[in-house]
Amino acid sequence: MPKSQHSASSTERSCLRLMPDEHFIHPSEESSSGRIPAEVSLIFYGREECAPGHSWGPGLRDTFILHYIQSGRGIFRSEGREYPLAAGQGFLISPETLVHYEADLRDPWIYAWVGLRGLHIRALLERAGLSAGSPVFTAADPPPFEGFYAKLLEAREQPGGDLLAQAEVYRLLAALVAGAPQPTARRLAPPPAREAHLAKAAAVIENGYSRKLGAEDIARAVGLDRTYLSSLFKHAYGVPLQTFVLQYRMRRARELLRNPSLSVSDVARSVGYPDPFLFSKMFKRVCGVSPTAYREEGAAEPV
């Protein structure tokens, strides 16, 4: 079994659709209160010493995840390509991209990772030359990569630790951009208008998720064609608009289910589902368990 330095409840991992690695869930606004993701949000992070041949996949993730190999070797497979990797290199898992990776049998890798979401995260990674089609990097300046896990651990114990952790994430992204091939590093973020549309749509969702709110309603409020707006969400978050709204509602529902004074019907109505049976069906589709099972198995945030 691989050695791991973190723990999280199996229910929470299932609900977030994470791989069964143990890790810290970062108490960001998105993960703890159901809010719309910020420009860049740290969702989780961790470090693992893998046993020889330890592997995961093929499977999908719903978050951008950067892995950095501190020592050892392994193989990363994505979109039909195979990448032999070693210490000083890393790989990106993009949302909804089929991946598989495994540690070397003789020299298994030790890696650290961060899970990221946000309005700008895809654009920032693209500035670093990273995408689903180009998922591998070599650390041109190793110290930011070697030390980010320890610094994130330290930040947990500090006043204002959330700000320190966010600063560390930006430092890591800056190192990636600085080390990218120059033509790629000069690539600009998406046009401001696109980001403004996403921000406006995010505000509509945040303010209206508890009512009947469909993709057409959001597009009308933003002043865009529904198909075009959905394509913006697909590019920014890896999922179309309707799926994003569903996942947002279920994140908020998980938060509300931690309140024992609220019934499942109360929670359903609070996230825009007047029919508790439909809510339960959708919750199970997204989270893998029913709302009642999620609550009974323990929905507390991992520590």
Image (spheres, helix red, strand yellow):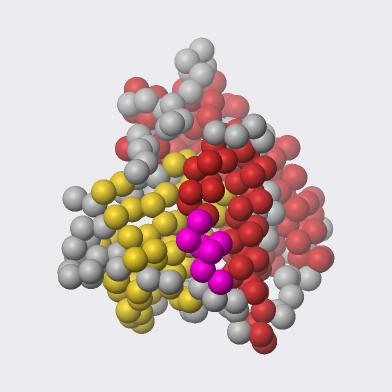
The answer, for residue 186, to whether it is visible in the render is: yes
Looking at the picture, tell me which residue is in the foreground, 120 or 24. 24
Against 249, residue 198 (above or below) is below
Residue 255 horizontal/vertical position (percent): 53, 29
Q: Quadrant of residue 230?
A: bottom right
Quadrant assignment for the C terminus? top left
Q: Is residue 229 left or right of residue 67?
A: right
Q: Does any portion of residue 34 appear in the rendered image?
A: no
At 57% from the left edge and 41% from the top edge, which residue is drawn?
155
- Going by the picture, which residue comes out furthest to the top? 261
Give the overall secondary structure of the magenta segment: helix
Residue that appears at 39% across and 66% down: 69
Q: Nearer the viewer, residue 288 or 160?
A: 160
Magenta segment = 141-147
**Is 143 within the magenta?**
yes
x and y percentages locating residue 75 in the rendered image: 30, 73
**Residue sitting farthest toward the bottom:** 183
| Residue situated furthest front in the rendering | 143
Position of residue 285 in the picture relative to residue 189 (left or right): left
User: In the visual, does 137 lie left or right of 85?
Assistant: right
Is 170 one of the magenta-colored residues? Answer: no
120 above or below 302?
A: below
Residue 300 occupies which quadrant of the picture? top left
Q: Residue at x 68, y 61 (%)?
A: 120
Residue under the image location 61 percent in, 64 percent down = 173
Callout count: 0
